[in-house]
Image: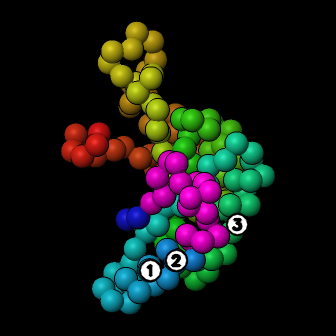
Amino acid sequence: FIKNDEPQGNQVFCQMNEVIPEVVKAMRAAIKETGVSKLFSANITADDPAEMIARAKYVMSQFGPLVENCALLVDGYVAGGTAVTVARRNFPKQFLHYHRAGHGSVTSPQTQRGYTAFVHTKISRIIGASGIHVGTMGFGKM
């Protein structure tokens, strides 16, 4: 499993038109070498629904026959439910990876308002996500 992290949607230092073809090339080589499918989660999050759709179409066009090995990542907590819904309605068959960067502001036990991570997960599924990014279960940076 490989993913663009939340700040890597299409930044000046990590442009999709340069990175995605390299990811596809590396995935093809890895699949050929190991005989095992790989999954890439491409961050299509943007502040404009039309830009999100354009990013997703570009990524999917680059993956071609490997498109089933590509999930669309939306930073659902930051971009909001509309961003998740836009991705789901426009790409109903693609796995939609909900990233929840920043969720601690409402799910932390120290906050006096908000909701639990369990509720956050349920909300993400209701609005169309296929799955939610849950972190490292106490290992690594989380």
Q: Nearer the viewer, mark 3 or mark 2?
A: 2
Looking at the rendered structure, the kind of residue marked 1 is Ala
Residue 53, image x and y in percent? 72, 57
Considering depth in this image, is 14 or 86 the residue closer to the camera? 14
Quarter assignment of residue 107? top left
Looking at the rendered structure, the kind of residue marked 3 is Lys
Q: Is residue 19 above or below residue 32?
A: above
Quadrant of the snapshot with the C terminus: top left
Say if residue 124 shows up in the picture. yes
- Residue 10 included in the magenta stretch of the image: yes
Q: Which residue is mark 3?
A: 57
Q: Nearer the viewer, mark 3 or mark 1?
A: 1
Quadrant of the snapshot with the N terminus: bottom left
Q: CA distance from mark 1 to mark 2?
A: 6 Å
Considering depth in this image, is 58 or 39 the residue closer to the camera? 58
Q: Is residue 23 above or below residue 42?
A: below
| Magenta span | 3-20
Looking at the rendered structure, the kind of residue marked 2 is Glu
User: Dot 3: what SS?
Assistant: helix
Q: Which residue is mark 2?
A: 22
Say if residue 73 shows up in the picture. no
Asked if marks 1 and 2 touch (Cβ < 8 Å), the reply is yes
Q: Which residue is mark 1?
A: 26
Asked if marks 3 and 2 touch (Cβ < 8 Å), the reply is no
Q: Is residue 80 above or below residue 90?
A: above
Residue depicted at x 74% and y 61%: 54
